[in-house]
Amino acid sequence: MPHSIDTADLLERFCRYVRLDTRSDAHSPTCPSTAGQWDLLRLLEKELQDLGIADVRLTADGYVLATLPATSPKAGVPRVAWLAHVDTATDLPGGATPIVHRHYDGRPIVLPDDPAQRLDIETTPHLRDKIGHDIITASGTTLLGADDKAGVAVVMSAVRHLLHHPEIPHGVLRLCFNPDEEIARGMTKLDLGELAADVAYTLDGEELAEIDYETFSADGARLEIRGVSIHPGLAKGVLVNALRLAGRFLASLPPDLSPECTADREGFVHPTEIAGNADRCTVRLILRDFELEGLAAKRAIVEQAVAALRATEPRATFTLEFTEQYRNMRYWLEKDMRPVELAREAVRRAGLTPLSTAIRGGTDGSNLTARGLPCPNLFCGMHQVHSQREWVSLQDMAKSVETLLHLAQLWHERA
């Protein structure tokens, strides 16, 4: 690029964002699902306005939408959207205290609020490659929130850079910061006509130079078990304990189809929550596979487990529901790989070697692609997400910014 990335501004933004607790909540019916997400959404709305962008809007459903006008003299340059989600995962607290480990020297990083949480180059993937980098972690008891506030900071930094350097030619860029990706509802309320883009990219990938165009296909499952209640002193021959039935159901699921026993292109059935009492309880699961046939087979496994339990205890009531969450974006992107190929070229121009794997997860781009808006996923440098040991390299985030800038220019060049 003709100008270097302002890493001081990038770091300041990222640390500001991760201090806000923006966990989403699958049990909430609202959008966004939590009040904390509004804090970051309103902050981003103001920051975009302060940068001088006139077309900024925060929708009633919690989507920050903005437009960066074209600088390209060409007509017909595709309108490209950049997206990042503001929520963090549900299982651990947010509101991080970020710690910047300058010029990482390769020694173990012990997180001060919980010394049991540590990162070292022997057991932490990719950390050895970051010796000399500035590594950002949380303090040990919360998520860092780099998933996806690293993506948010990268997009904001790229926007700021382009505003400061209008000589870089690009088409119209649409920006979207959205809620609730972590509970598979990130795109539920987004109007694609309002987004008004021809192609899009999420900034929600991990490894340096990663470009994702193949994800899991995903379903959710909810099993409600209704037992028979009575005082435990009078329970013989009468009580049907819903919690015990839930335990039998979970024990009947094939252990070799659990996340802890699968890798690469293998799917899984994963119980995520159990709640209730002896009278009634609910078990929630997620089902994942790269192919729809495999996903259907995992639905059948759950159905068979419930049927077997129903047969052994006819006095209980079992209600099983499945919900489609997202689908493998490869099914659509492989028909037109241009968005992926231009992303690969942008990565090369940033001095990196493109990396693509079938990611064991999903992004908001999975939903967008299925709805007709091609949307690969790009790296923003985060690692060990959904854990207290989450970390990110400032230098990798800067490379992500650089990749976005090249990508914007490439769509201009190839128009």
Image (cartoon, rainbow, N blue to C red):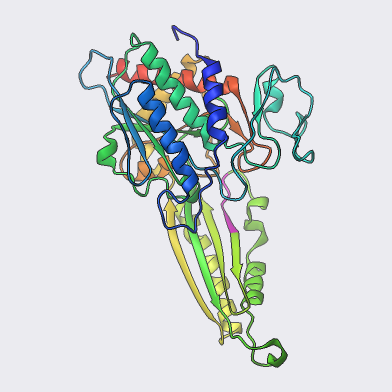
Q: Is residue 270 magenta?
A: yes
Q: Is residue 268 magenta?
A: yes
Q: Is residue 234 left or right of 224 when viewed as pictured?
A: right
Q: Which picture quadrant has residue 328?
A: top left
> Is residue 85 something one can see in this rendering?
no
Asked whether 306 or 51 is in front, the reply is 51
> Is residue 45 something one can see in this rendering?
yes
* Count of picture labels: 0
Task: Name the outermost residue toward the top.
Answer: 2
- Rendered-image quadrant of the C terminus: top left
- Give the vertical position of 163 relative to 57 (above or below): above
Q: Which residues are magenta?
A: 265-271
Q: Which x, y percent locates residue 147?
A: 55, 37
- Rendered-image quadrant of the N terminus: top left
- Give the vertical position of 362 relative to 84 (above or below): below
Q: What residue lies at 33% left-to-right and 8% top-to-bottom? A: 167
Task: Name the outermost residue toward the left.
Answer: 75
Asked whether 50 or 332 is in front, the reply is 50
Q: Which x, y percent locates residue 42?
A: 41, 36
Q: Is residue 34 left or right of 49 when viewed as pictured?
A: right
Q: Which picture quadrant has residue 281?
A: bottom right
- Give the vertical position of 81 relative to 230 (above or below): above
Q: Which picture quadrant has residue 45?
A: top left
Q: What residue lies at 68% left-to-right and 90% top-to-bottom? A: 235
Asked whether 24 or 338 is in front, the reply is 24
Q: Which x, y percent locates residue 145?
A: 57, 37
Q: Which x, y percent locates residue 319?
A: 49, 74
